[in-house]
Image (spheres, rainbow, N blue to C red):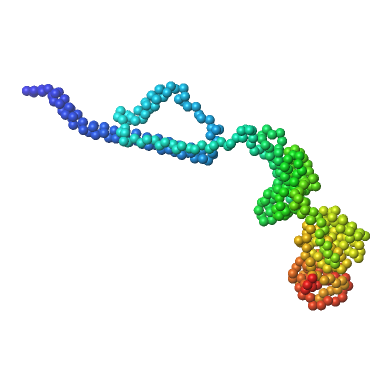
Amino acid sequence: MLVRHNTKLLEQAIDLQIKRSAIPTLQAEAAAHDKIARANAFRRMASGAAVAMAAIGIGVGVWLVFDRDPTLIQPEPSVTQNIPPNQIEDETKETKKSEDRIPGGETIAQEGKTDKPKSPQIEQPKPPPVDPANPDTFDFVKFANRKVAYAGSTWQLESGHHFDSEKAPTWDTAWCYTRKLANTGIEVQVRLVNRSSPTSMPLAPVSSSETLASVGLDDTSARELASHCLWLDEARFAPTDFDMDDERKEAAAAADELSVQQDGWDAIGNDLPGMPAWDVSLEQCQAQCKADRRCLALTYDKKHAACFMKNNGSILVRSPDAVMAAKGAIKANLQYSSLVFAKDTVVIGGAYANVRSGYADCVLACSADQRCLGFNFDGPNKMCAMLDSVTSSSSYKGVVSGVKATRN
């Protein structure tokens, strides 16, 4: 006979026992989830702090680079300007509470919290001082530029005009300068003109004679270049309109004076076009040279009453019938040659050069070459022979010779 037992209670008892045995496992899992949640919360807080520090660093760096005037930066309107203070405080507390909690409802341990670092206090730059008597006064300069072709080069002329204020009706001082590569390869600024006021006489040149010479200019050419400067008041000046300081005036006067005169010497070569001027006296020859800015030296032929005006006079040679004179501008460049000349005479010696040239060029070439001890110039054939040794001489029609003496 089959007996059926009711096992429902037994099954419930077994199920209850199984659930009781699983409690430790569930508790361990809950603890693990709790630790994971805590770690995630710490990580979020640390990331937020790092981002905040980076933002502060970037902000300080941008301010240091651009050095912006704080008076030009308008503060952005705060979103809490129209919210009552008590509501702001409540929302802040609520926000902090929400940040301090994790999904499990438990608060973060206080010893695990780290306060966010405070941003360093940045010293704001002070605004520039303002003149209380004239708050609109600032330095204000306008430039007028022009390119001109002069002496085979292109020159960039820059004219600056200084105004007392942006509202000033006209400038108070002005100047003009140019930039050029010097013979040393360095670019130099050459000051050409200063105008102390719109009505005063312009002063030119301003840069020293050494600076002018480094770019191929002198006082005369600098004034000519300065006459091309462009001015805001459309003023125009001729080279003779410019004034000079007293020291420069004295130097210019000395440069234009025939301060050197030697009887029995001839300034070789460098004749101006149209020379000589015949049937003139020595005084007339000198007056003509003073009046002509191109003339820097002269030779007067007493035998033929002939005047030879020259644009240079670096080499002087002996000539009994000649008188030479030179302006102070080239006084330092004069060189006295020891050549002694003879007409219709040929010098015998060792020739190291034979070139086609004029008589004056032949004399200049031998005078400037230390190797040359003498020369023969064949007039009919325009040939110059330079000698590095001289043994004797003999008559030869049509040849002019010269021999360097041991002393002047």
Write down the quadrant of residue 182 in the picture. Answer: bottom right
Quadrant of the rendered image containing residue 107: top left
Check the image and name the residue furthest to the right: 279
Say which quadrant the N terminus sits in. Answer: top left
Does residue 93 appear to the left or right of 222 in the view shown? left
Percent of width and height locating residue 203:
75, 46
Whether residue 273 is visible: no
Above or below residue 192? Residue 270 is: below
Left or right: 68 in relation to 156: left
Q: Residue furthest front?
A: 133
Q: Which residue is at a point 41% across and 24% down the rendered structure image?
A: 88
Seen as rendered, the residue at the extreme left is 1
Q: Residue at x 79, y 71 (%)?
A: 408
Which residue is at 26% across, 33% downward?
Answer: 31
On screen, residue 65 versus residue 230, left or right, reads left
State whether residue 81 appears in this view.
yes
Number of callouts: 0
Where residue 142 appears, as percent x and y from the top left, is 68, 39
Front-lying residue, 2 or 49: 49
In the displayed structure, does residue 82 sit left or right of residue 385?
left
In this rendering, the answer to whether 263 lies above or below 191 is below
- Percent across and percent down for residue 336 are 79, 66
- 206 or 56, nearer to the observer: 206
Q: Looking at the picture, does residue 342 appear above or below residue 94?
A: below
- Res. 55 image quadrant: top left
Report x, y in % for residue 246.
76, 50
Residue closer to the observer: 190 or 396: 190
- At horizontal 87% and vertical 75% (from top left) the residue drawn is 395
